[in-house]
Image (spheres, rainbow, N blue to C red):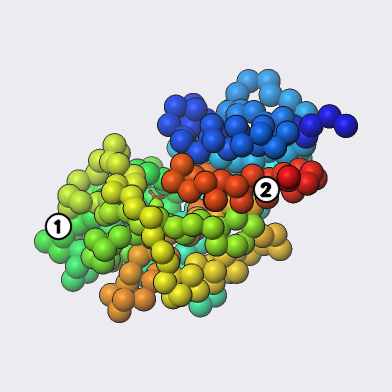
């Protein structure tokens, strides 16, 4: 029997910057699997030639969402796509935070402004400042925080997005992000490893699309409360499937309890270079999904 063919799906930016990508491809090959990195938008890829396509770093999807979701549908008709298409679609828009909140998961307090909604300074009155971001984004793109005295600038930012037909999230700035945002990585629903990173929105009032997305990373040992909250978020995903991989980003809220900032089911950095055990778990899971026993 020939080795299972596995596409590890990336993008131009992923080929350049994804540190997880070569590690995953090499580790899969070491298991005897025919793994190769493929850009999701590469010309004339025969997706039906793969037994499995694992999304890894399709990092340009946020600016090409419709095109990307069309590819997700095509790919999942041609091969087995992981995470599954409905999960990818759901996770691509941070309005899922409202659904998680409805299901009792603690999340960053979040309001959504839709294109056409009126918005004025009163919408951005928060004692510790406010964060404005598009509902579809990554790497803090078009995301900024504003001090209480900067509500007029927050309105301008929100209107700039709304005028492009984009929905906007408005959140209080959670100052305890200074104590580190926690990124908990799960493989097939089981906790693998975690890191903590520093705050990204260091300068109030500034939109800067070239910020370092994961500053000052250190390994993190999650508390019981963090593990509970991250697991509750995963359990609340409206899907019968368990994600192959997931990253749950948490911050400490005002009362000290962890709240979900983001539930990444598409193309999260998994920081596998810092964690060989996590790499092993992922490769074992992918091998099992490809219908082969990992050795
Ligand atoms: N409400 C908030 N309070 C504090 N910091 C925030 C808040 N929202 C976003 N940030 C900061 O901005 C970064 C990017 O925001 P996030 O919601 O994670 O979007 P993405 O990573 O998809 O761009 C976070 O890692 C965090 O440092
Ligand atoms: Mg984030």
Residue at image point 88% right, 32% down: 1
Q: Nearer the viewer, residue 103 or 124?
A: 103
Vertical side of 228 occupied by 84: above or below: above
Q: Secondary structure at mark 1?
A: helix
Residue 280 screen position, x and y as percent:
60, 47
Whether 150 is drawn above or below 51: the answer is below
User: Which is in the foreground here, disc 2 or disc 1?
Assistant: 2
Lateral position of residue 180 relative to residue 48, left or right: left
Residue 62 or residue 184, whichever sits in front: 184
Q: Position of residue 137 (x, y in %)?
A: 42, 46
Query: Is 259 left, or right, of 277 in this rendering?
Result: left
Q: Determine whether the residue tagged by mark 2 lies in a helix, strand or loop.
A: helix
At x 55%, y 51%, the residue is 277
Q: CA distance from mark 2 to mark 1?
A: 50 Å
Q: Could you tell me which residue is drawn at 47 percent across and 64 percent down? A: 97
Residue 81 appears left or right of 172: right
Is residue 118 visible from the viewing direction of this image? Answer: no
Q: Residue furthest top?
A: 44
Residue 156: % across, % down: 23, 50
Q: Is residue 149 above or below residue 259?
A: above
Indicate which disc, 2 or 1, sits on the residue closer to the N terminus. 1
The residue carrying pointer 2 sits among few (fewer than 14), some (14 to 19) or many (20 or more) residues within 10 Å by Cα, namely many
Residue of label 1: 150
Residue sitting at the far front: 295
Residue that label 2 marks? 284
Q: Dot 1: few (<14), some (14–19), or many (≥20) neighbours within 10 Å?
A: some
Q: Which disc number belongs to residue 217?
A: none
């Amino acid at each position: 029997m020939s080795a299972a063919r596995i596409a590890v799906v990336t993008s131009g930016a992923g080929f350049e910057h994804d540190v997880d990508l070569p590690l995953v491809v090499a580790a899969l090959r070491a298991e005897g699997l025919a793994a190769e990195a493929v850009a999701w938008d590469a010309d004339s890829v025969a997706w039906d030639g793969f037994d499995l396509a694992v999304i890894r770093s399709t990092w340009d999807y946020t600016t090409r969402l419709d095109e990307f979701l069309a590819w997700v549908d095509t790919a999942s008709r041609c091969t087995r796509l992981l995470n599954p298409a409905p999960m990818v679609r759901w996770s691509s828009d941070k309005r899922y935070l409202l659904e998680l909140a409805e299901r009792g998961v603690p999340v960053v307090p979040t309001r959504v402004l839709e294109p056409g909604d009126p918005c004025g300074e009163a919408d951005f009155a928060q004692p510790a400042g406010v964060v404005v971001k598009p509902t579809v984004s990554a790497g803090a793109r078009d995301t900024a925080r504003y001090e209480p005295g900067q509500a007029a600038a927050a309105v301008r930012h929100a209107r700039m997005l709304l005028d492009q037909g984009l929905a906007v999230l408005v959140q209080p700035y959670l100052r305890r992000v200074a104590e580190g945002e926690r990124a908990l990585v799960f493989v097939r629903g089981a906790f693998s490893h975690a890191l903590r990173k520093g705050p990204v929105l260091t300068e109030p009032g500034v939109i800067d699309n070239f910020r370092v997305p994961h500053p000052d990373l250190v390994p993190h040992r999650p508390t019981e409360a963090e593990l509970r909250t991250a697991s509750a978020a995963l359990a609340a995903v409206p899907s019968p499937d368990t994600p192959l991989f997931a990253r749950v980003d948490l911050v400490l809220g005002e009362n000290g309890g962890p709240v979900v900032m983001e539930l990444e089911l598409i193309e999260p950095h998994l920081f596998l270079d810092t964690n060989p055990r996590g790499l092993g778990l992922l490769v074992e899971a992918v091998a099992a999904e490809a219908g082969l026993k990992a050795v």
